[in-house]
Image (tube, helix red, strand yellow):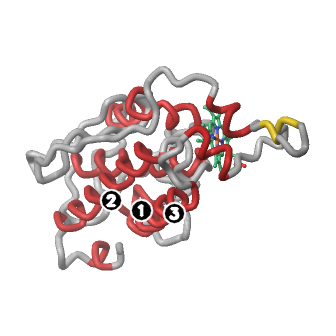
């Protein structure tokens, strides 16, 4: 664990938490609202280049983690192409903002929307189980008044400060994808690599916890 090399590209709010010392002890009770608000569509759309999701460069075993992207960096106009597709039959543009399988396919011809949604849902369900440490059915982290997941996580024996920061990064990414509400559609390849790496890291974190600790046993 001492060589745990999960590194974040742009996790300012998370670093802010550390600088404020809120991760220092096992009874730390963070307050404040440092998780991503829900307008993350553009961030995930830009994927690797956006810098607002936490791109871990290595897992806890030191393996390099790579990220795929569904869009070239300079993609333009695709919000409109998916969400306001021209309906040939109706002769109208989609002001309902509802993306369709057809409009999705026009923008990302090699992807299948239903497959993307199913894969994302499965990964998100797994991460939900791993991150809902206080078992109240929600994953928020960082706001103890709203949800005590981080507090519960801090109580698991064997979790170093580095581990807590890494788990915060995972929770950040989870909340980004959740708030984005596209079930992976906004960047299938990127969102899949992001969530897959987060799942790997959470599995490794669990292995690093002290196995006889009661908090660890009720974790997941
Ligand atoms: C490749 C197709 C595609 C592109 C490009 C795309 N979206 Fe989406 N978006 C979807 C799909 C599919 C959903 C899931 C909900 C739906 O079916 O409308 C969604 C969901 C959303 C939602 C949530 C809607 C809700 O009901 O909760 C918002 C907001 C949104 N997109 C905004 C954007 C913005 C802003 C952009 C451009 C940065 C964008 N989308 C680009 C396909 C796309």
Residue 121 bears which disc, if any?
Answer: 3
Q: Can you tell which quarter of the image residue 54 is in?
A: top left
* Image position, residue 4 (x, y; %): 14, 47
* Image position, residue 24 (x, y; %): 28, 45
Helix, strand or loop under label 2:
helix
Q: Are marks 1 and 2 in contact (CB under 8 Å)?
A: yes
Ligand 1 quadrant assignment: top right
Horizontally, residue 180 falls left or right of residue 85, namely left
Between circles 3 and 1, the one closer to the viewer is: 3
Helix, strand or loop under label 3:
helix
Q: Is residue 37 above or below residue 49?
A: below
Camera-nearest residue between 95 and 32: 95
Task: Measure the alpha-carbon separation of dots 2 and 3.
Answer: 13 Å
Q: Earlier in the sequence, mark 3 or mark 1?
A: 3
Camera-nearest residue between 63 and 76: 76
Q: Can you tell which quarter of the image residue 26 is in?
A: bottom left
Q: Earlier in the sequence, mark 2 or mark 3?
A: 3
| Res 143 visible | no
The residue beneath circle 2 is: 199
The residue beneath circle 1 is: 127
Q: Residues within 10 Å of mark 3 (few under 14, many from 20)?
A: some
């Amino acid at each position: 664990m001492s060589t745990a090399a999960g590194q974040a590209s742009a996790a300012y709010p998370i670093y802010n938490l550390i600088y404020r010392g809120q991760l220092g002890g096992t009874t730390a009770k963070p307050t404040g609202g440092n998780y991503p608000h829900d307008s993350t569509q553009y961030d995930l759309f830009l994927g690797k280049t956006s810098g607002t999701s936490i791109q871990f460069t290595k897992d806890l075993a030191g393996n390099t983690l790579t990220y795929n992207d569904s869009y070239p960096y300079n993609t333009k106009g695709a919000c409109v192409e998916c969400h306001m597709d021209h309906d040939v039959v109706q002769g109208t543009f989609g002001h309902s903002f509802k993306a369709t399988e057809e409009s999705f396919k026009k923008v990302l011809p090699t992807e299948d929307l239903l497959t993307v949604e199913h894969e994302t849902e499965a990964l998100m369900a797994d991460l939900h189980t791993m991150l809902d440490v206080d078992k109240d059915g929600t994953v928020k982290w960082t706001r103890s008044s709203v949800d005590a997941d981080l507090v519960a996580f801090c109580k698991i024996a064997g979790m170093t400060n580095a581990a807590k920061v890494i788990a915060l990064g995972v929770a950040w990414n989870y909340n980004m994808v959740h708030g984005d509400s596209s079930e992976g559609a906004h960047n299938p390849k990127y969102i899949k690599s992001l969530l897959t790496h987060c799942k790997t890291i959470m599995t490794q974190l669990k292995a690093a916890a002290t196995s006889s600790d009661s908090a660890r046993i009720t974790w997941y």
